[in-house]
Image: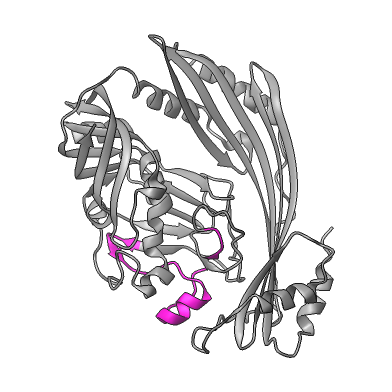
Amino acid sequence: MIEINKYRKALQSLPAEILEAEFNIEKNTSQMIKVSGKEITDNAYSDIVEIFARATGAKTGFAYTQDLEEAPVEIIKRAYHNSKEIDEFNKNRLNKKGELFIAPENIPAQGDMYQYAISLEALLLNSHPTIEAVIVEARIDNTSSRVLNSHGLDKSYEREVHYLSAHILAKKDGKAYNVGFALSSKSFSEINLEEISLQIVNQLESQFDPVGFESGIYPCLLDRTVMVNILMTAWQIFSGIKYQEGSSAISGKLGHTIGSSCLNLVDVPEHKLTGYSFKFDCEGTEADQNKILHKGVLTTLLNNLKSADSLKQSPSGNAGRYALLSGTIPTDIIVTPRILYIEPGENNLDHLLKILDHGVYITESYDVFHSINIASGGFSIPCRGTVIRDGKKTENITELTISGSLTDLLNNIVATGSDLYIEEFLKKSYCIGSPSTLIKELQINAG
């Protein structure tokens, strides 16, 4: 049980050297089962409360704890003592809006994890003759987030996410293949099991019997999972912090065209294709739809309070802590997306292949964290795919690398598919989405 009142009281009577302070209290519970052969092979339950504190006076600092017995005033003092000297202009400023956000009272029912898991397992076992085994993970996550500060702000919300993932083991001609895919929603009944099956079969078949390939520049279709993988790292070019620092490949391009006229990129607090929702950020700024790219034009950026102040823009509800993988506890407030995605078009995958006609369908990509330079925009990403002739899949190809610059990639988008896919990322702190995207030309290196 979290005693919210003791944190409120601490904020009302700050130590003399501290001008303002803030608590962000996150409670996350998760229950999970794994099913294979209709048997539950693993199960887990976790219940974690994380408390992040920020304190500002002549300087600003941060602290973190999972100890609910630690006195709130001591957490505030520790945050301030962790601080570094900063000047007045760069001082973190807290939200001064004090409205209370009422959390929804009717959280969806949990449903039956086991029944949905065995249904997905049975569907996959019958979906392709090479599939020999399936492991399904069913998970229910409950998250509550609260932001309180010394200006009287007190906001809270809750969400529940239902999640199904499947990994298959297949064998063909003595070779083993592994493929996985996952979807989330507000309830298991809203998760499309057939979509999981179709995606897995598509990726499985793209691995069979690869042939040699000649390096060159080709028209390409990027599978939705490939574009999601790219955006998982590439979203940082839209960070207001990196833009202001000049460490983004698009710094100085606000208001300019940096992508194709068919490209729209938005950041939203919730979407029907995922159970995730982000009503406000860790500073208490309420979220709304934020159109980053409109017909290829860079219209705005992802901002927290500090970056918005530096750029003289409005805060966009994008204050966060988890940018990329890190071995340390991220207490400092940075910029992260909420649900960032490329808006879908009207073409299904088959029609996009017909439009491509002759080219390469890139079906999977790997290791994007180390393969994209945010400052220069350059990328070189390992991948595999399928050669397309007359709009049809032919030979599979592997050990490929796609390379180029992010701005060229965005400018070369010819069409977006109707198959929008949204994936959770990094401690479930934000989501990235994309449909399949048709690219005019892309450098592909083989071997």
Looking at the image, the residue that sits furthest to the top is 173
- On whether residue 315 falls in the magenta region, the answer is yes
Q: Quadrant of the N terminus?
A: bottom right
- Residue 95, visible in the rendered structure: no
- On whether residue 50 falls in the magenta region, the answer is no
Image quadrant assignment for residue 98: bottom right
Image quadrant assignment for residue 322: bottom right
Above or below residue 92? Residue 67 is above
Task: Please name whichever residue, 59 or 204, is drawn nearer the observer in this view of the structure.
Answer: 59
**In the picture provided, is 283 more to the left or to the right than 205?**
right
Above or below residue 302? Residue 31 is above
Above or below residue 390? Residue 30 is below
What residue do we see at 32% from left, 43% from top?
Answer: 381
Residue 392 screen position, x and y as percent: 23, 24
What residue do we see at 34% from left, 37% from top?
Answer: 223
Task: Please name whichever residue, 185 or 376, is drawn nearer the observer in this view of the structure.
Answer: 376
Residue 350 screen position, x and y as percent: 29, 30
Q: Name the colouring of the figure.
A: one colour
What is the total number of numbered labels drawn onto the structure image? 0
What residue do we see at 50% from left, 58% from top?
Answer: 323
Magenta-tinted stretch: 293-322
Image quadrant assignment for residue 92: bottom right
**In the picture provided, is 427 more to the left or to the right than 295?**
right
Q: Quadrant of the C terminus?
A: top left
Residue 108 screen position, x and y as percent: 70, 44
- Residue 409, visible in the rendered structure: yes
Residue 235 screen position, x and y as percent: 40, 57
What residue do we see at 65% from left, 37% from top?
Answer: 139
